[in-house]
Amino acid sequence: MTFQILITLLTLGVAVVLFVSERLRVDLIALLVLSALALLGLVTPTEALLGFSNPAVITIWAVFIIGGGLSKTGVGVIIGRQLLRLAGPGEVRLIVLIMLTTGVLSGFMNNIGVAALLLPVVMDIARRTGRPPSKLLMPLASGSLLGGLMTQIGTPPNILISNALEENGLYAFGMFDYTPLGIVILLTGVVFMALLGRHLLPVRDPAKSLKGATAAELGAMYDLEGNLFLLRLPPGSHLDGETLAECRLGAVLGLNVVAIIRDGHPNLAPQPDDLLKEGDQLLVTGVADQLVSMKNHHLLQLERQKLPIDQVMTKEIIFAEVELNSGYSRLGQTLQQIDFRQKYDLMVMAIWRQDRVISEDLENLPVALGDTLLVQGARGSIAALKEIEGIVVSDVKKDRVSWLNNHLMTVRIPSESTLVGVPLAESRLAEAFGLAVLAILREDSTQLMPTAEERLQANDIIFVRGETDHLLTLYDLRELQISQEETPEASQLESSRIGLVEAVLSPHTTLIGKSLHQLHFREKYGLNVLAIWRGGRPFRSGLRDMKLRLGDALLLHGPRSKLRMLASDEDFLVLADEIQEEPRRKKIPIALAILAGVLIPTIAGWLPIYISAIAGAALMVLTGCLSMDEAYRFIEWKAVFLIAGMLPLGIAMEQTGTASFIAEGVINLVGPLGPMAILAALFVLSSLASQIMPNAAAAVLLAPIALNAAADMGISPYPMMMIVAVSASAAFLSPVAHPSNVLVLGPGGYRISDYLKVGIPLTLLVMVVTLLVVPLLWPL
């Protein structure tokens, strides 16, 4: 082993560890690998960037756009609906038609996109036939993975394998060279799922069917009625005349108001500006514990003592104004994204934007050109700001000093408060009451600018910036009475105007890792999230601050007009057929003609696939099948950067002899057992790799190993490369192995064990069939 091989193996090992840990995004890992290879001299700077101009990468993003055009015109979903409606109520027929339909469409469209398109259709069929969606959704995901094997453009590994052959001066697999084997594997998967796999899938109560279910069924699925209760505004309540938003029920108590009942008439899905009146009953979802605790114990006690501003200033801790100009590079980002508090060691008290003052929810407010921030911090930290381009620091103007003085308050932490012992970061003083803590007075000592880790203690005196009205609301909320009347059923949450439906995050979503609070979900979409289904169970409290994950299913309640608007949002898939965005049906003939125009020249050998794919993508936009903005959204940029970043590692493995070194190891280990053992070893290695890293990365890494193994054994490279293509897409063992698996996780109510029960025998069966068929089609 040479030093270069050792360095390459170490780079590969670090990449694998990072993929498995999931601490970093896969595209970022790929870019780090690219950078490391260039810096270590394992590839030249030019070779490091070759991935971005590689024909395979270009083909992949162009195919994403073509698939997007077919999606927006409704080709896939219309074909899917017509075929699946022929299936009837029988479970076996349903599974067979779902997998065949998904598989055929996945041969020409992005398999994730096909799964997303047909998800609402399959959910609708599950409801109408009384079948649990858990019996149908995993076949949907598996069919999309298996169907992608049937053509060159069906899945990225196929495109990469063809490209690797061409770059090594060999005959490259064409558009339908994958088809004979792909059809056999798809049919094998269909037979397995229809005869055995369906018995391994979990059985859910058909009444708990998600998509298109009635409000009662959804309520049962999410155990919604267990968290529904009534609150009453007693006569003389201080909340009389307040808006729903001003009451801060969600921020303070974590409750969702789903209806206001007045004089026996329910107002479903009330808006934030709806007024409350004494005697109103509020139908809410959530946990009553916080309200009960607040009624029995004082959370905070407002002190009469007013605090002058000079009490939170010293020679070192001062206030300053920070104006943001056009040169500031972080405009448009929130204070949280900038990490303003930690990065600059400063606390933002308020933001002046034109003629208004913003002092609430500052962490989630994108800063804008011309904003003036009132900050508190050490002189040194404020002086350091002056060195940053686009920032102008100045003394605080008198009117802003006056504003701050008027908004300073003193509150005490009573000994019985539930905040005792809680770190400031978890106290939710900012989120619930809009308070910024400037100082803590404790045993005659004052702690200015306490850290987020500082724990509150009994009888602490806290100096805060905030609105007195918000604290007074705390006392007003204690007046609410928990009604003993019978709670309305979940079925009563719907009307002709108000709907209760589910939505999942789409494969193209940009919302991963963001909370509903950060997204201002209620304000932006006008809908309430009543529960989130994750990991096989519903979450009904603490939703405001839960970070969204791919695979989450959100139970939404609100006006049907708002639900229709959400259905057109690229970040969500609404699981209700009647609310789906209307496809551009008039463009279907054009989209199909463009697809034919891509396939025919490629099959005939008139044009390489990457040229015809680019032309097809451009025509999809030019003819209005989708807009340019939509085209960008359909491109899985994560996959593009992943592949472009990992291709140089394949080059380094080839040039340093690492691929040959690994190939020799495989041959020495299983070579005495014959070529079939080599094929089996490659399948196992590639299949396992695709469970812990994206299948495209697995194909990039295994392709040079397969080519070197074939050369060392003196056998044809084609069966080896076909094995890698198939096994890289055999990602059935876990939800994270492929986005199609994650997509059905929430709606199907699956657990990781469900994927293992079905995935292990399916992977073994696909391996056996592949090993039997490949030598017949591509002799060794």
Image (spheres, rainbow, N blue to C red):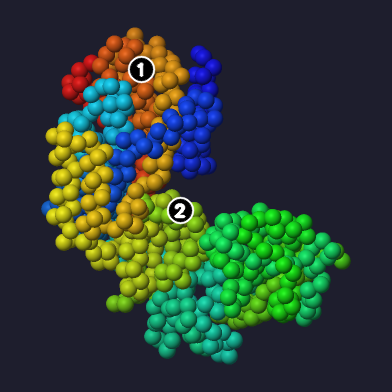
Give the numbered dot on residue 708. Answer: 1
Nearer the observer: mark 2 or 1; the answer is 1
| Element class at badge 2 | loop
Compared to residue 499, the image places residue 187 above or below, namely above
Q: Position of residue 617 (x, y in %)?
A: 26, 48
Quadrant, the C terminus: top left
| Residue at the spot 13% in from the left edge and 34% down from the top edge | 604
- Label 2: few (<14), some or many (≥20) within 10 Å? few
Q: Residue 61: tell me if it is visible.
A: yes
In this view, which residue lies farthest toward the top? Answer: 672
Q: Residue 87: tell me if it is visible.
A: no
Q: Where is residue 548 in the image (x, y as percent from the top left)?
A: 46, 55
Give the numbered dot on residue 255. Answer: none
In which quarter of the view is residue 589 placed?
A: bottom left
Which of the two residues, 108 or 603, is positioned nearer the viewer here?
603
| Residue at the spot 80% in from the left edge and 67% down from the top edge | 313
Say which amino acid is labelled 2: Ile
- Label 1: few (<14), some or many (≥20) within 10 Å? many
C-alpha separation, residue under disc 2 versus residue under disc 1 = 40 Å
Closer to the N terminus: mark 2 or mark 1?
A: 2
| Residue at the spot 38% in from the left edge and 58% down from the top edge | 571
Q: Name the residue under label 2.
A: 512
